[in-house]
Image (cartoon, coloured by chain):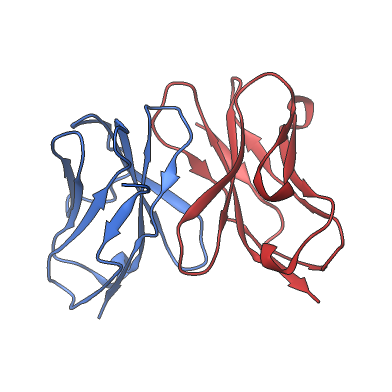
């Protein structure tokens, strides 16, 4: 597509539920990134994919967070047993390859009740 | 590890006035530097980037930034601000070897008419 697409745009769920967030990168972009943005704060890096592998997952805050990428395209970020502190906007970005400018989607706003 | 400081949390300028947003970074080698803008409810849009070469870089929407190695700074400037420039601005640092961007906490720009 023309840009990075994320779905859903908004997600409200109860504490303890699992959620899946989806990212469709720009076609042909081999690098894909997930970031988290808490209210009023900057972006925190979560994980980086080059192709289907994740050479840097150092930003995942706990083992409740996981991500996968298939077909060098779509990526899914999964949060298990959600907690209220998981409430944030989750942003996905892609680039032609690692180190190049990243293009961001509009994010998924996750609210945990 | 790299880090970014944006000293100004909130700046208000009058439409037509000049603008300078400050960014200081910490990184041992030559950094890749970026400025992004975020409008409410949207993702981040790349304004400009510095990889190497000319230290004064031009971006979209009339913005420019100057890389000053001696001051570890990459300040964003615009000679005449428009009301539509009101948004949150993020400075970020990366490296040539890919992976994550490290973001500052952002500067919120308000433009008065």
Q: Position of residue A41 (x, y in %)?
A: 51, 61
Give the answer, above or below, for where B12 lies relative to A60. Answer: below
Question: Tell me, what hue is chain B?
Answer: red
Query: Left of A93 or right of it: where is B108?
Result: right
Chain A representation colour: blue
User: In the rendered image, which quarter is residue B58 located in?
Assistant: top right
Q: Say whether residue B47 is left or right of residue B43.
A: right
Q: Nearer the viewer, residue B93 or B64?
A: B64
In the image, what residue occupies the spot 21% across and 55% down?
A22
Q: Which residue is at a point 79% across and 60% down the rendered structure image? A: B81
Question: For residue A72, what is the image quadrant?
Answer: top left
Residue B72 is situated, as x and y percent measured from the top left of the image, at 71, 32
From the viewer's perspective, is B97 left or right of A80?
right
Which residue is drawn at the image coordinates 47% and 38% (left, top)?
B101
- Answer above or below: position of A12 versus B66: below
**Image coordinates for residue B96, horizontal then vertical, percent:** 48, 21
């Amino acid at each position: 597509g023309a840009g990075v697409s994320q779905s859903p745009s908004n997600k409200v769920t109860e504490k303890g539920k699992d959620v899946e967030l989806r990212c469709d990168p720009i076609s042909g972009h081999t690098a894909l990134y997930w970031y988290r943005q808490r209210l009023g704060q900057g972006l925190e890096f979560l994980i980086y994919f080059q192709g289907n592998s994740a050479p840097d997952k150092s930003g995942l805050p706990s083992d409740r967070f996981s991500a996968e990428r298939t077909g060098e395209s779509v990526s899914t970020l999964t949060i298990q047993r959600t907690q209220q502190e998981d409430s944030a906007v989750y942003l996905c970005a892609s680039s032609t390859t690692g180190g190049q400018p990243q293009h961001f989607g509009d994010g998924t706003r996750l609210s945990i009740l | 590890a790299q880090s970014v400081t944006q000293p100004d949390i909130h700046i208000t300028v009058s439409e037509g006035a000049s603008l300078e947003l400050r960014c200081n970074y910490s990184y041992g080698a030559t950094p890749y530097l970026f400025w992004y803008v975020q409008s409410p409810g949207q993702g981040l849009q790349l304004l400009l980037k510095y990889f190497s070469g000319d230290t004064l870089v031009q971006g979209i929407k009339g913005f420019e930034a100057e890389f000053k190695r001696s001051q570890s700074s990459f300040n964003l400037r615009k000679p005449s601000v428009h009301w539509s420039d009101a948004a949150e601005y993020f400075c970020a640092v990366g490296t040539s070897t890919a992976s994550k961007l490290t973001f500052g906490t952002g500067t919120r720009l308000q433009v008065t008419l």
